[in-house]
Amino acid sequence: MFIRSRRNLAGWFMLSMGSILIVFAGVRYYLTAIERLRNLDFLLYKKAQVVAATVQYERQQVNLSNVPYLGDLPLPPNSDVVYARWYSQQGQLEQFFGVASIVPLKDESEFQTLTLEAGLFDSQPVLVRQITLPVQYRGNQIGYLQIAIPLTQMQHDLEQDLLLSLVCILVALIVVAATG
């Protein structure tokens, strides 16, 4: 009778510790994913600001010749930008690098996660993070800049993090079972 009670107590102990570990690992993974996405958004916003700052506006005309990705300059080395697009004040696509848009432009600055279809860059669909940034000159809006970068590295890092978490939970459960 004592052995059965001890096994039941050890089983409940293992179940409760396992549940706590799984909840803790899930919350940690979620917070890590949110933080990495926030950092990626900050990087994307800074890239978009740098590109937008090079747009020249002369005599009611937008000059994109010196704009990275959109102008005559060669592409920056080790660039991870999937596409860059310039839209007019009315939201019409005027110039682009990479993939042309088939989705109409929204009149707001926001981050979006989109899926690019297979065959454009790889054999599988690619997730990208995109920002649409309104560009202003002396208080007047002169157009919109849209830039996207791939999420493949972040996905890979999160998959590695998840695998490590699962291995650690498994090892911890084995230790709890042996202790119980």
Image (tube, helix red, strand yellow):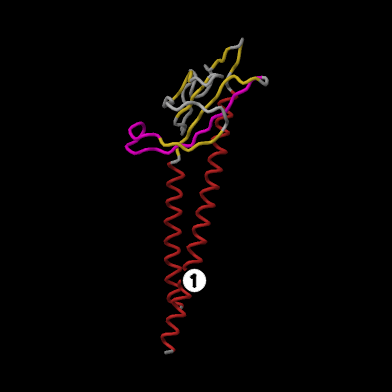
State the image coordinates of residue 173 (x, y, percent, origin top left): 44, 69
Q: Is residue 132 magenta?
A: yes
At 42% from the left and 39% from the top, the residue drawn is 127
Residue 153, compared with residue 20, is above or below; it is above
* Quarter in which the N terminus is drawn: bottom left
**The quadrant where residue 128 appears:** top left
Residue at 55% x, 30% y is: 48
> Could you say where residue 153 lies in the image, as x and y percent from the top left?
44, 43
Residue found farthest to the right: 138
Residue 25, image x, y percentages: 49, 59
Most distant residue in the top direction? 59
Q: Is mark 1 on a helix, strand or loop?
A: helix
The spot of residue 39 in percent (x, y) is 55, 42
Mark 1 — residue? 16
Labels in figure, total: 1
Residue type indicated by callout 1 = Ser
Near mark 1 (Cα within 10 A), the count class, few <14, some 14-19 or many ≥20, is few
What span is in magenta?
116-137
Residue visible at 48% across and 37% down?
129
> Is 130 colored magenta in this rendering?
yes
